[in-house]
Image (cartoon, grey):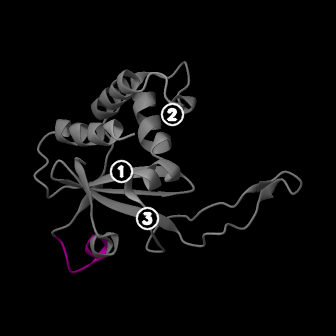
Amino acid sequence: MSKYTVLNHEEELSKYISDNNSIITYEKVFDIDLFNEVGAYFLAKHPLSEHQRYIHKNDDMTGIGITVMCEVFNSETLSKLFGEPLYHDEFGEGFEGDYDEELEDYLEPENKSSYASYFVKVNDIVLHIGYDHRGTCFEFDNNNDVTDISQLTEAIKVLIDSL
């Protein structure tokens, strides 16, 4: 049984961007203690996993945690966990096409959207997980009574357990 619920992305995005809805306010997840714990947890759970290719031998736990959240949870991984994202143009910088060595530049991307979003409820915390060409970003609804960063850490551990 899954410990997370994939929410209706379109409904949640409309709440996210609505000027009339001051109840939903999201904050980016950026906390050194969280990154340290996520890094250590990931290495303990997936010591020889396919995702290790993202980890560099000189990374400290903070770097590993950031890498897990920004690169291990990439478009392919997120799609396996949550299905298709909601592609939209509300924010973001878009996507890059394949790199053409002959031109020494990126080709026009197939996907013309600016951003891809997932809205997922984990341990009663609503997360907005989204990405564009820069990588993946985790945000949380700060009206979820998140009183301690450990609540977010535990939610992210649930997602790591699902890899």
Q: Decide which of 6, 124 is in the foreground and name it.
A: 6
Q: Which residue is tagged 2?
A: 51
Q: Quadrant of the C terminus?
A: top left
In the picture, the disc for residue 85 is 3
For the residue marked with disc 1, what is the amino acid? Answer: Phe
Q: Which residues are magenta?
A: 14-22
Where residue 123 appears, as percent x and y from the top left, is 17, 47
**Location of residue 104 with respect to 31 vertically, above or below:** below
From the viewer's perspective, is 108 left or right of 114? right
* Residue 110, x across and y down, in percent: 66, 69
Q: Residue furthest top?
A: 58
What's under tag 3, amino acid-wise?
Pro
Left or right: 139 with respect to 43? left
| Callouts 1 and 2 close, C-beta under 8 Å | no
Helix, strand or loop at label 3? It is: loop
Spatial CA span between label 1 and label 2: 18 Å
138 sits left or right of 76 in the view = left
In primary-sequence order, the first of circles 1 and 3 is 3
Tell me the kind of residue under disc 2.
His
Identify which residue, 77 or 61, lies in the foreground.
77
- How many numbered circles are shown? 3
The residue that label 1 is drawn on is: 138
Residue at 32%, 42% (x, y): give it: 159
Between disc 1 and disc 2, the foreground one is 2
